[in-house]
Image (tube, coloured by chain):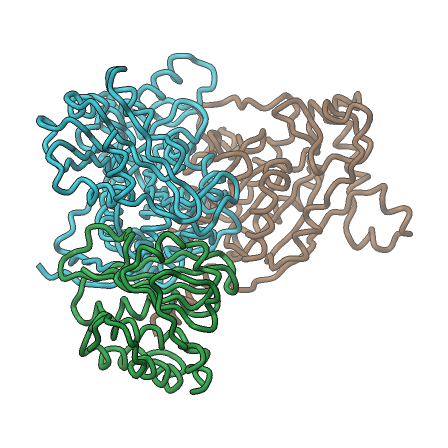
Amino acid sequence: MSGHEHPSLKYMRKEVLPTAFCPGCFNGIVMNALFQAFEELEILDLKKYVFVSGIGCSSWIPSPYIKADSLHTLHGRAIPVATGVKLANPDLEVIVIGGDGDLASIGGNHLLHAARRNMDLVVIMINNLVYGMTRGQAAPTTPKGMITPTTPYGNPEEPMDVARLLASTNANYVAKWCISQYMFLKNSFKKVLGEIKRGFRFIEVYAPCTTFVIRRENKTPGQKLKELMNTCIGLEKLEKMPREERTKYIPTGVFKENDKPGFIDNYRQYVSISKR
Amino acid sequence: MFSIAYLGRGGQGIVFAATITAEALYEKGYYVAQLQNYGASVRGGSVLGYVVADNKPIKNPFVEVFDVMIALHEEGLKRWKCLVEKSKKIIVDEKLVKSEVSGAIKVPLSSIAEEEGVYQALNLVAVRLAFKVLGITGIDEVMDKLLKNRKNYDLNKKAYMIGKEIVIFRDFGTE
Amino acid sequence: MCMKRMLISGNEAVAYGAIDAGCRFYAGYPITPSSEIMHMMAKLLPEHGGVFIQAEDELAAINMLIGASWAGLKAMTATSGPGFSLMQEGIGYAVMTETPLVVVDVMRAGPATGQATKAAQGDLMQARWGRHGDQYLVVLAPESPQEAYDLIIEAFNISESLRTPVVFLSDEFIGHGREVVFRKDPEEIQLVERRRPSDHEPLFGSDDPRIPPPMPRLGDGYYVLVTGSTHNEYGYRDVHSFETHYRLVKRLKEKIWGNIDKIFKYEVVGDPEGAEKAVVCFGSTCRSAKEAIEGMDDVVLIRLITLWPLNYDLLRKLLSNVSLILVPELSLGQLIYDVQQVVDSDVKVIGVNKVGGGVPIYPSEIKEALKG
């Protein structure tokens, strides 16, 4: 059978399948895009890759499903743990996978400072708009007006645009894609794993929670995907639109792309000063 | 075993006085312990710095009775009244310490320092005076070396040597 | 013997000791009165091929240590009360995942911001019990800058050999007090390194709970699963079964308590057989206590160097003949509960408590209290 095995399976711990994700969860699409990127880059074994995640549904992607070293850390603390790993052994490629609540709310400070340092990490943030694991409470990314268990009268707060925020830092690479934009997402993964191999590389994936966002809207994941194909549009196209039109759309694309020295390079430079 | 305490106000260099006293005695081969008590701010607030020295390892640095206590400001005096009063030899600055301290000798340290143009280094005047009062000899060479490693050598050295010239008319014993 | 004599503060002594113990990673956030440790590590680590990073906060610092430790480096951070509070969740994670690391808490007067520059010993209970859940780790406390140097090396050794976080309780007097410290030659220092796995033995379980499982480095090809959730001996998360959770926390507890003979360090001054009175103390306070009891044949002093796990049986034995016990502490009294626990109710246990203002407990106060 192995000849007909799904190409993603070689990157997975088969013994723990099926995954615990809800039927129709978009996490699987993100995983496939990531594995396809590895495959196309001819990276067939993840021995030298370390995955670090926090708490939340998307944090379960690497732990236990990806066959690589993984650290499933405290809520919000994936980035500092990943930073420690990378600094202690720069030969390892360290990838953080987490949700919007984990990375942008409880871990928001770490996210900001890792970006400021241009820390040599790949950070994949799956933005499902809510705290999916704990029954869909409002997150800092929840749209204004959305009804959740903690905002029963409609979310009174404005959401944060994490990608745009990070684009204003020293981060080398910032992109945001909708789950409906599979090829862009996969190519973005290839970019940060194969081309820009240093500095802080951040990819946000807009993927509303199947259970606590899509079902609340009385839609199926398929219907939502179709809808996203229309509502997620490129940055350039968005900019050509009249201002009042723009709010209806979700801007996607590459917000920032650089290949400047990351923290590790800068630190090596710094250490060479100490030895002089 | 002997002990030296400096008392004053933040900004007077009390901790530095204790630091350099400890270093000089250390260089002379003593076991030393240096402790200080100060606030978080750089200026203002009372500061106590002290040094214990011995020919053998220091068992307890928490000294209650100092062999010599030099107070350079009123502020510290109130706070550390109990320690000041227990000290064997108490020297207070004539001008900067207003209140009466029983058994204390008033010395115009700050006035002399001001006249000589070394007011900023009043702490080092006190350091040399402490050595003198305790009869610690042969320490000037070590101090010179330590001061040379730091900024403002000329000023500091001048201030330090003034401490040597101050004469105290009290049977404290001198060099 | 070729020891290097230095005039340094206890904080600097901790940094030198850590370097000599093989510490090659430091992440921290500045806080009085611990910052000098951080300053020294910032200076020393690049020279020794190590890594230093100033974290954005203490939450980040402790978690960076966890990452670095799994990547194979001996790691340390230093903080004081407020920062130590922030580190608790990370320390709990280190207990659960059996991550060796050393956390130095240079104690100041609390709670909250308290008095930043004033010594205290009020974090004892927090060091033991600051985390949620069933968790056990090792707490050590030096009494002087010299011991800070020697004992921090021991802290790393215990941390490595038991795969556990170790909390090192210093205080402002030790941290900022400068004294003559003898630094050892590298050849004189016995270092312990964590055991690496030989084949595919379990990384999170062992038949004998006293023997910690081996720990690979990330990148060694073990496909390690590290998780703070309840996990089986291979690292797989199991957040449902009673057996897995009970087995895990029970083993983690026995790993610490079962090794008490190796971990528990203490000093006795005087004769516990002949003494009628005792002083039980830890940290810098013991130095005044030792001076106070000099020449008193009827007093025995017990200094606890290891504060957790505490050998209650031994303490009970040492205190079995006395009728009066003093427990001097730079707090309103925390160690005193341990002492009360091991003696009969007719034994008088008196706390000599003082905290704030940076005022030490003086020998005269202990002498006075010993009169009963």
Does B162 sit above or below residue C107? below
Lateral position of residue C93 relative to residue C325, left or right: right
Figure disc tally:
0
Residue lying at 48% horizontally and 47% vertically, measured from the top left: C115
Displayed quadrant of residue C338:
top left
Residue lying at 52% horizontally and 63% vertically, measured from the top left: B44
Residue lying at 20% horizontally and 45% vertically, measured from the top left: C291
Lateral position of residue C353 relative to residue A177, left or right: left
- In the image, A245 versus A196, the foreground residue is A245
For the C terminus of chain A, give its image quadrant.
bottom left
Residue C62 can be seen, yes or no: yes
Q: Which chain identifier belongs to the brown chain?
A: A
The colour one sees for chain C in the rendered image is cyan
Lateral position of residue C122 relative to residue C253, left or right: right
Q: Position of residue B83 (x, y in %)?
A: 35, 54
Does A258 sit above or below residue C204? below
- In the image, A135 versus C328, the foreground residue is C328
Tell which residue pokes out farthest to the top in this image: C242
Q: Which chain identifier belongs to the green chain?
A: B
Residue C220 can be seen, yes or no: no
Q: Position of residue A22 (x, y in %)?
A: 62, 22
Lateral position of residue B40 relative to residue C290, left or right: right
Does C131 sit above or below residue A177? above
Q: Position of residue C137 (x, y in %)?
A: 33, 31
